[in-house]
Amino acid sequence: MLKCRTVWKKLAPLARASSTLCRQNVRRTALNNGRTPAYVPEAHMSSGPAGGGRANQMYVLLVGAACVGGGVYTYQTVKGDGQRYQERIEEISSRPNKTQASYIQTEPPAVEATETEAVPEPEPEATPSSGEPSPPAPDVEAVIHTVIQTSEAPPETSEAPPAEEPVVEAPPEEAAEPPAAPVVEEGDSAAASLKVPSHAPYLLIGGGTASFAAARSIRARDPGAKVLIVTEEPDAPYMRPPLSKELWFSDDPSVTETLRFKQWNGKERSIFFQPPSFYITAEELSSAENGGVAILTNRKVVHMDVKGNKIKLDDDTEISYDKCLIATGGVPRNLQVIERAGEEVMQKTTLFRKIEDFKELDKVSRNVKSITIIGGGFLGSELACALGRRSSEFDLEVIQMYPEKGNMGKVLPEYLSNWTTEKVKSEGVKIISEALVKSVVSKDDQLEIQLKDGRLVKTDHIVAAVGLEPNVDLAKSAGLEVDSDFGGFRVNAELQARSNIWVAGDAACFYDIRLGRRRVEHHDHAVVSGRLAGENMTGANKPYWHQSMFWSDLGPDVGYEAIGIVDSSLPTVGVFAKATAKDTPRAATELSGTGIRSESETEDTATSPVASSTPAPSGSHKDEYGKGVIFYLRDKVVVGIILWNVFNRMPIARKIIKDGEEHSDLNEVAKLFNIHDD
């Protein structure tokens, strides 16, 4: 059709000129005969014997010459275009590391970017170039044959362009870390679109566990979905728990590079959820026929236009979306006295959160004599136990200080907190309890920590493990509500902040239909909320009903799993028994086959084990808390449960929380967990 228009544009002026000449000849004939005819026969407009015969003969010659000339010109043009098209295809095919279907560059070194075209030539049949026309379609060939009265056709025009050749995927190592977008000059928006897609049907802000769980959920419900993850980190989504647990117990000297660890059961795995081959590059996302998950690393979203359904990156690139998930997680808190202490103190302080923090602390622990961990929560206690194992090998002094009386004092009842404190001490850690930091100064190449009660602690390095601050930087530009009590983006039970915006993970302050408004900072919650958000982004409209769990291990022999609201200020009832060799984190991973126990706990389907007929002892082991269950009560209703060295029973605990019933005899309830002496 394009060629038909071209031919018509060339022949139309000749036809109009011939028509004008014919009318003029008729008028002249009438004037010569001295009268104006009332009717001019159609034959007089041709080469008949009526008046103007010689002029009409000239008209026929002109029209014929124009037709023949136009046909010859068209034939030569089409033939030349076919040859140029074939040469162009051969030239593109000979390029290294190119894909013939999409012509997307997979290796963008700076030198090649300047030597090759910034915008690949579009496919001929889709958008023909003005300089190099496309081969003609079959219907155009028929028109040409009619005009020039020949059956010859150039062989190049009978072949369709090779648009159906398979797309060559980028190498796996490049897929996990898409190259940074090249510098694009003004007006070169087409080149920019090759590196960063201008539109993503599903846009996920944040590259942590919640984002990955949402991406997997979206793809499960919508197999052709195109998902784009934008993350500030340089790495693909990975699990954070091993950074403070199993990685520290690895015998591999190159563990900081491989990031592979042995689980308590001896099996080895990587901290990354998926290998690089799982992801596609951001360049491929728009053209991927079957969709996929792409990642933009080292990119920060600085502005969010909720009305316009688009975001702006820190390099001013804009990306529009249909549906968006905010999973920005949180940033580690620091003590104000450390922040005010100056740059020299900050350089010797680690805020533990990411892969780079693990690598830095691992290096520090091998080169200093003393490390002080400030914080007695999950992270601080895990790092204290992990570093304590190294104390004898590297002649390292490990100190843990916190304002509570005992380890995990905000979570565990006092008697159990005291027991875990002794357990941490047995790992080679020096405990300083009821410690409130007054000031920190750098003196004689050491840090001096002055406590409010006058105690002075000298150390070489500080690890601040004092909590997490939810990342709500986008709240202002997006006009989203931040909860004043719990922090984080305030969302409903479906995790929605707006009709097409969801929030999951640490940054979500959600409404739990069983326990009320909450904000949770644990791995399994990121999995659960991310999965639910992904389902709801594809139209599931499900409320938050699944109670996520969390767990902590004080080495391979002592661990616990918890669910619901576990707050030491609530009334508690504990039922304990002696532990066996089967009641350890190591045994739990041997049974489940995974070091991340929440992966087996993210579905609320399990068969309850047969309850023991042996009465569950209560308080018979005052100083021996081998295994047990701690119930947390609010208005005589169980709102939280800790399973102490009891594993693979979380579905039972989850059911108790969901039922919301009063339990007057929790000794009987404990039987469901097989708490008895073997």
Image: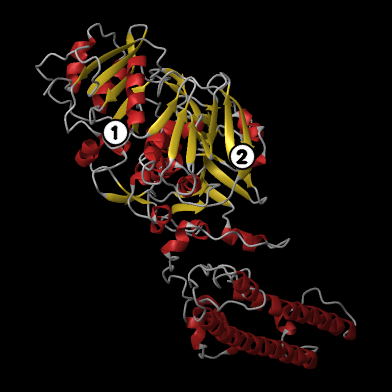
Q: Quadrant of the C terminus?
A: top left
Query: Can you say whether 331 is above or below 187 in the image?
Result: above
On residue 346, the disc is: 2
Query: Can you say whether 268 is above or below 59 in the image?
Result: above
Please tell me which residue lies in front, 105 or 564: 564
Amino acid at pointer 2: Met
Left or right, 505 with reference to 552 = right
Q: Position of residue 191 (x, y in %)?
A: 63, 63
Neighbours of disc 2 within 10 Å: few (<14), some (14-19), many (20+): some
Q: Position of residue 23 (x, y in %)?
A: 80, 78
On residue 603, the disc is: 1
Query: Which residue sits furthest left?
Result: 613
- Which circle, 1 or 2, is nearer the viewer? 2
Q: Quadrant of residue 170?
A: bottom left
Q: Position of residue 612 (x, y in %)?
A: 11, 20
Left or right, 264 with reference to 278 = left
Please tell me which residue lies in front, 439 or 599: 439
Left or right, 132 with reference to 434 = right
Q: Quadrant of the N terminus?
A: bottom right
Query: Can you say whether 186 is above or below 101 in the image?
Result: above
Neighbours of disc 1 within 10 Å: few (<14), some (14-19), many (20+): few
Left or right, 141 with reference to 411 = right
- What residue do we see at 27% from left, 14% from top? 574
- What residue do we see at 46% from left, 57% from top? 176
Does residue 642 appear in this view? yes
SS of the residue at dot 1? loop
SS of the residue at dot 2? helix
Amino acid at pointer 1: Glu
Please tell me which residue lies in front, 538 or 144: 538
In terms of sequence position, does the residue under pointer 1 or pointer 2 come before the other? 2
